[in-house]
Image (cartoon, helix red, strand yellow):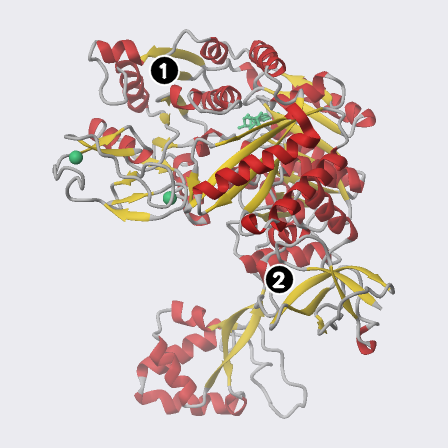
């Protein structure tokens, strides 16, 4: 027998191994196998197929070991991996790397969590011996007090003494409750004192395995809020739509109560004994939604995302394979990879969010597409929810591929926020700007803070200043490895490259002219924070961006503090735009709309519209109407007017007009082809060669090669080709040709060290 095995290597295809006689019973599809690979390596692979077709032409190696009794991967997961690998043109080994927690990928990567417990040693485990012990400790009062605390904490002292009675009866008495060493230390005893008791042979320390998953308590379905009439109507329409369509779009304005509708749908699925996958684009968001769901679904809810430790993710994975899996999984992108045996519903909240797409590394998959595919494979329904549908989704809804349910009423009919546009170019001319702040933004912020309300300021750049510049000669520090200028981080007092992460010291003087005056250019969130603190010294400011949210605890703390009013002014990047729900935010400031519009990308307008609409939606959520101050240099542009009017329909109409005229999605399918190499001249030549080859087959559908806006990253020069493929073209054929072109290039000796990869449906 032979096993075709998926290995975590960036090479195409499966690898065949022979199964030694004594292992044939144990090898099954979906179990992990230890197999030799290369000269001296062994890898943990996954058995994807078992057959008896002996491969020809090479020496076949044996499976070394079978690591699981039961499969860790279900059939449907394997199918999803293969679909992703196929569709996104990425080796299945890359999908394996992305999908499986590392603890399952390594032979001994996962360690159960243990805690240290203490107990009486056998010789002191009797009533008589306890008295001896207490006597022994009379001269060591600290130890005696620790020992007495041990006895009372473990209820050995207080309990009426059946447990302390005769030790003669054979079965050892139950030792409950058990006491951890930490519990004793927390009672005010030092480690040396406790260690002394161990040394005397009175107490002993032992290790015990404990689970990492927290248990959310009993479910309380009675906590589910009744739906308003408009919400109930939308709920019914969703249910009705599911009778005919696998995918339905719930287009509900911010604060219309989409989340409440999801909760009712989840309850309905649970009543039918089905599981639910609830995807969110951003980890920051899971904190809030988690609380809302936990309140209702308690221990039936599991959370899964990349900020959870690998060991926690292993435990959730295993729980989902067990006989009592979580019924509801709330997670970010990677949660689509979890095992589901009984999936009935997938909810993709904020479906328009671009963070659903994995950019780097491969597989460059879109979790929305992957989740829809997963649902389809398992016969589940998918609900896409958003206030600002992505162009693709809305297009599918309008053309009938997806069902469509609108909900344009906010809960309690609170009005959408009033958006006031401020022309910052004009104010700059009249010297009325205070740094990045207009007088209106400052006065509105001040009034809000004085009223006891909260304020959110949105600036889509992190760091202190996007650029340093020599006052004298205009020199700008740039990354040595990438074709970009460096961002100045004042708190760390360093320059950092946001493309490769490399950091540099801030030069004391300009290396070009020796001038000691280096000016900061532009505003990042860190500088906004510093400026705001100067202007409003009494404000309690928090900042949420990539730099302040490295850990899960940091996220949770920032959000909890703001929710509880311990902070009242939140500054952040796009992280804050995503569905956060705060009660007392009455003012939202968008500091610079133009930075979003001036991106060299056909999606810039789409992203800008969504970002501004979403950020605005954070204002005035409970109680009364919120205020948004939108600062821009182009107040009269149609897009700004559409944002102000919350006019999604006009925005979409203009967008489709432009997309169809210039041949962009959803009217064509895009594939980007990237070539990377250390040598710019080599990658230039390779790009031209690849372009020629692709044009043989695809003709004028091929554009480029071009240098992308950032043409060098991590010391690799980049060229990009664009394929615009009309809808209806056989994509399997397209992929075959692309793979062929890639192979031919890499077989050419000149180009063998080139990196070539594809980005399918790029964002
Ligand atoms: P969305 O997800 O559409 O932005 P939410 O579900 O977050 O909207 O609702 C906005 C706010 O209104 C939340 O604080 C929510 O608890 C409240 N809310 C919405 N619908 C109801 C309802 N039917 N009963 C009670 N509160 C509701
Ligand atoms: Zn200079
Ligand atoms: Zn760099």
* Residue at the spot 81% in from the left edge and 64% down from the top edge: 55
Location of ligand 2 given as a quarter of the image:
top left
Task: Find disc 1 in the rendering and name its residue.
Answer: 632
Total numbered circles: 2
Crowding near the residue tagged with mark 1, few <14, some 14–19, many ≥20 C-alpha atoms within 10 Å: many
Residue 315 locus on image (x, y percent): 62, 59
Question: What distance separates the C-alpha of mark 2 from that of mark 1?
Answer: 49 Å
Does 762 sit above or below residue 45?
A: above
* Residue at the spot 23% in from the left edge and 28% down from the top edge: 536
Contact between marks 2 and 1 (CB within 8 A): the answer is: no
Question: If the image is split into quadrants, where does the N terminus sit?
Answer: bottom right
Does 651 sit above or below residue 239?
A: above
Location of residue 490 by image quarter: top left
Residue 675 locus on image (x, y percent): 53, 41
Question: If the image is split into quadrants, where does the C terminus sit?
Answer: top right
Crowding near the residue tagged with mark 2, few <14, some 14–19, many ≥20 C-alpha atoms within 10 Å: many
Pointer 2 or 1: first along the chain:
2
Q: Residue furthest right?
A: 52
Residue 243 visible to an observer of this rendering: yes
* Residue at the spot 33% in from the left edge and 25% down from the top edge: 452
Toward the viewer: 212 or 199? 212
Residue 672 visible to an observer of this rendering: no
- Asked if residue 48 lies left or right of residue 509, the reply is right
Toward the viewer: 511 or 353? 511
The secondary structure type at the circle numbered 2 is helix
Location of residue 547 by image quarter: top left
Does 236 sit above or below residue 365?
A: above
Q: Is mark 2 within 8 Å of ligand 3?
A: no
The secondary structure type at the circle numbered 1 is strand
Residue 479 locus on image (x, y percent): 33, 42
Any mark on residue 105, and which?
2
- Asked if residue 431 lies left or right of residue 549, the reply is left
């Amino acid at each position: 027998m032979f096993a075709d095995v998926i290995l975590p290597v960036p090479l195409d295809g499966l690898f065949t191994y022979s199964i030694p006689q004594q292992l044939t019973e144990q090898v099954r599809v979906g179990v992990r196998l230890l197999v030799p690979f290369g000269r001296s390596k062994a890898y943990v692979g996954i058995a994807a197929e078992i057959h008896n077709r002996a491969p020809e032409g090479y020496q076949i190696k044996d499976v070394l070991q079978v690591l699981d009794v039961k499969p860790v991967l279900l059939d449907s997961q394997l199918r999803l991996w293969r679909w992703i690998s196929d569709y996104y043109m990425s080796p299945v080994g890359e999908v394996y790397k992305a999908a499986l927690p590392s603890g399952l990928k390594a032979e001994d990567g996962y360690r159960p969590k243990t805690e240290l417990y203490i107990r009486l040693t056998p010789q002191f485990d009797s009533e008589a011996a306890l008295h001896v012990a207490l006597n022994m400790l009379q001269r060591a009062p600290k130890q005696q007090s620790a020992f007495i605390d041990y006895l009372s904490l473990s209820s050995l002292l207080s309990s009426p003494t059946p447990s302390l009675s005769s030790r003669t009866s054979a079965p050892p008495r139950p030792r409950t409750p058990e006491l951890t060493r930490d519990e004793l230390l927390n009672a005010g005893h030092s480690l040396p004192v406790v260690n002394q008791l161990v040394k005397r042979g009175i107490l002993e320390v032992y290790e015990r395995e404990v689970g990492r998953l927290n248990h959310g308590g009993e479910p309380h379905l009675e906590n589910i809020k009744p739906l308003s009439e408009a919400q109930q109507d939308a709920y019914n329409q969703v249910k009705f739509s599911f009778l005919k369509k696998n995918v339905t779009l719930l287009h509900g304005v911010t604060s219309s109560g989409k989340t409440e509708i999801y909760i009712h749908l989840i309850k309905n699925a649970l009543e039918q004994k089905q599981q639910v996958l609830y995807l969110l684009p951003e980890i920051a968001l899971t904190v809030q939604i988690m609380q809302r769901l936990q309140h209702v679904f308690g221990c039936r809810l599991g959370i899964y995302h990349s900020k959870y430790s690998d060991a926690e993710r292993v435990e959730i994975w295993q729980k989902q394979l067990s006989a009592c899996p979580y019924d509801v999984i709330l997670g970010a992108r990677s949660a689509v990879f979890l095992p589901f045996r009984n999936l009935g519903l997938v909810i993709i909240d904020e479906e328009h969010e671009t963070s659903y797409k994995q950019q780097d590394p491969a597989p460059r998959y879109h979790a929305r597409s992957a989740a829809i595919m997963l649902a389809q494979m398992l016969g589940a329904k998918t609900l896409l929810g958003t206030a600002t549908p992505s162009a693709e989704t809305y297009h599918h809804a309008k053309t009938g591929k997806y069902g469509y349910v609108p909900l344009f009423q906010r809960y309690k009919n609170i009005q959408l926020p009033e958006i006031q546009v401020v022309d910052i170019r004009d104010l700059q001319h009249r010297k009325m700007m205070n740094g990045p702040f207009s007088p209106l933004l400052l006065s509105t912020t001040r009034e809000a803070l004085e009223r006891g309300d909260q304020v959110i300021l949105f600036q889509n750049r992190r760091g202190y200043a996007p650029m340093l510049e020599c006052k004298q000669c205009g020199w700008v520090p740039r990354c040595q490895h990438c074709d970009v200028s460096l961002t100045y981080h004042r708190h760390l007092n360093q320059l950092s490259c946001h493309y490769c992460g490399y950091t540099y010291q801030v030069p004391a003087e300009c290396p070009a002219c020796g001038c000691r005056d280096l000016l900061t250019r532009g505003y990042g969130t860190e500088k906004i924070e510093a400026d705001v603190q100067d202007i409003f010294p009494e404000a309690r400011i928090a900042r949420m961006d990539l730099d302040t949210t490295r850990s899960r605890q940091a996220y949770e703390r920032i959000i909890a503090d703001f929710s509880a009013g311990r902070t009242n002014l939140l500054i952040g990047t796009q992280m804050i735009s995503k569905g956060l729900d705060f009660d007392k935010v009455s003012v939202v400031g968008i500091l610079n709309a133009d930075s979003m519009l001036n991106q060299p990308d056909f999606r810039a307008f789409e992203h800008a519209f969504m970002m501004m609409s979403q950020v605005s939606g954070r204002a005035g959520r409970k109680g009364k109407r919120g205020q948004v101050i939108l600062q821009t240099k182009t107040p009269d542009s149609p897009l700004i007017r559409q944002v102000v009017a919350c006019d999604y329909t006009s925005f979409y109409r203009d967008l489709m007009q432009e997309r169809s005229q210039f041949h962009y999605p959803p009217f064509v399918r895009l594939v980007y082809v990237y070539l990377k190499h250390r040598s710019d001249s080599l990658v230039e030549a390779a790009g031209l060669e690849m372009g020629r080859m692709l044009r043989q087959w695809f003709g004028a559908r091929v554009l480029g090669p071009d240098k992308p806006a950032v043409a060098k990253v991590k010391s690799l020069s980049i060229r990009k080709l664009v394929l615009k493929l009309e809808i209806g073209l056989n994509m399997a054929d397209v992929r075959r040709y692309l793979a062929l072109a890639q192979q031919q290039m890499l077989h050419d000796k000149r180009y063998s060290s080139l990196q070539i990869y594809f980005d399918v449906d790029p964002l």
